[in-house]
Amino acid sequence: MTHTLMDLPFHENALEPYISKETLQYHYGKHHAGYVNKLNGLIEGTVYADMELEEIVKKADGGIFNNGAQVYNHNFYFNGLCTKDTTSPSKELLSLFERDFASIEAFKEIFLETAAGLFGSGWVWLSMDESGSLVLESFSNAGNPLLSGHTPLLTCDVWEHAYYIDYRNARADYLEKWWELVNWDFVSANLAACTQ
Ligand code: FE2
C-alpha cells in the first residue's frame, strides 16, 4: 500500500500567530511530506509494503521505523491541534487528570517541563497504560508509546523544525503557546475510544 500525506484538519493560517503559516508550510509541507515519501520508497518490495502504518511502527526498525514513526507521530501531532479556545477536555479526561496528576494544571506543568527538558529532538506524549492510568512519556527522535504497549492520547513535537521559524531557540515559549492550541476534542475522543 502507498501511504499518503494526511490533510491538515485546519487552514494553514488557523494557528497564527502562535504557529505560523510559514512553519506549517515547512513542518507539514516539507518535513511531514518528506517522511511519507521516504517511507513509501523504503518499504517497496519488503514485508512492510502491505502493512498498515501502526503495524510498521510496531514491527520495523532502522530507516523504516524512523520514517514510519515520524509519519505516525506527525499525524497525531497535527490532528491534536486546532484554533485557540475552540475545544475543552471532556469530564472523563478531567477526572483522570485529577486522579493521576492532581489536576490538569499540574499535568500541564509537568508535561511542559518534560518537553522543555528533553535533550535534542523528540516527542512528549500523554498515553494510557495497560492498567488504565494516564502516563507521561518522552522519547528521543521518532519514539512513541506504541512501543511501550500504551495507547497514545496527545503528543507534542519538540524537534526544532516544529518551532524554529516562529520561536528560534525559545522552546519553552513554543510549548506555552502549543498548549493553547491543543485540540481537546481529539484527546477526549482518543480517551473515549480506549476506555469503552
Ligand atoms: Fe515535526
Image: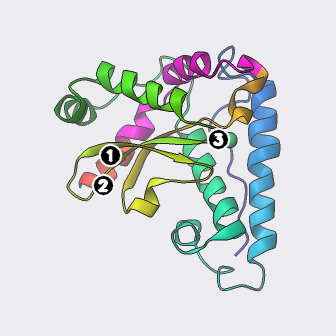
Q: Is residue 170 magenta?
A: yes
Q: Upstream in the sequence, badge 3 or badge 2?
A: 3
Report if the CB atoms under discs 3 and 2 are less than 8 Å apart: no
**Front position in the image: 64 or 183:** 64
Of the numbered discs in the image, which one, if any, rests on residue 191?
1
Q: Nearer the viewer, residue 5 or 127?
A: 127
Q: Nearer the viewer, residue 176 or 186?
A: 176
How far apart, in angstroms, are the residues tagged by discs 3 and 1? 26 Å
**Based on the displayed image, in which of its 4 quarters is residue 43 positioned?**
bottom right
Determine the main secondary structure of the stretch shown in magenta: helix
For label 3, the SS is: loop
Q: Work out how far the residue at label 3 is from the one at label 2, CA to CA, in angstroms.
A: 28 Å
Q: Which mark is residue 121?
A: 3
First reached walking from the N terminus: tag 3 or tag 1 = 3
Residue 146 % position (x, y): 45, 60
Residue in view at x 27 percent, y 35 percent: 93
Location of residue 140 with respect to 119 vertically, above or below: below
CB of mark 2 within 8 Å of CB of mark 1? yes
Residue at coordinates 42% horizontally, 30% vertically from top-left? 111
Badge 3 amino acid: Ser
Q: Which residue is mark 2?
A: 194
Residue type at numbered disc 1: Leu
**Quick one: label 3, few (<14), some, or many (20+) residues within 10 Å?**
some
Q: CA distance from mark 2 to mark 1?
A: 5 Å
Looking at the rendering, the stretch of residues picked out in magenta corresponds to: 166-188
Q: Is residue 114 rendered to the left or right of residue 1? A: left
Residue 143: give its label.
none
- The residue under the point 55% across, 32% down is 81
Q: Is 169 colored magenta in this rendering? A: yes
For this view, does 195 lie left or right of residue 11?
Answer: left
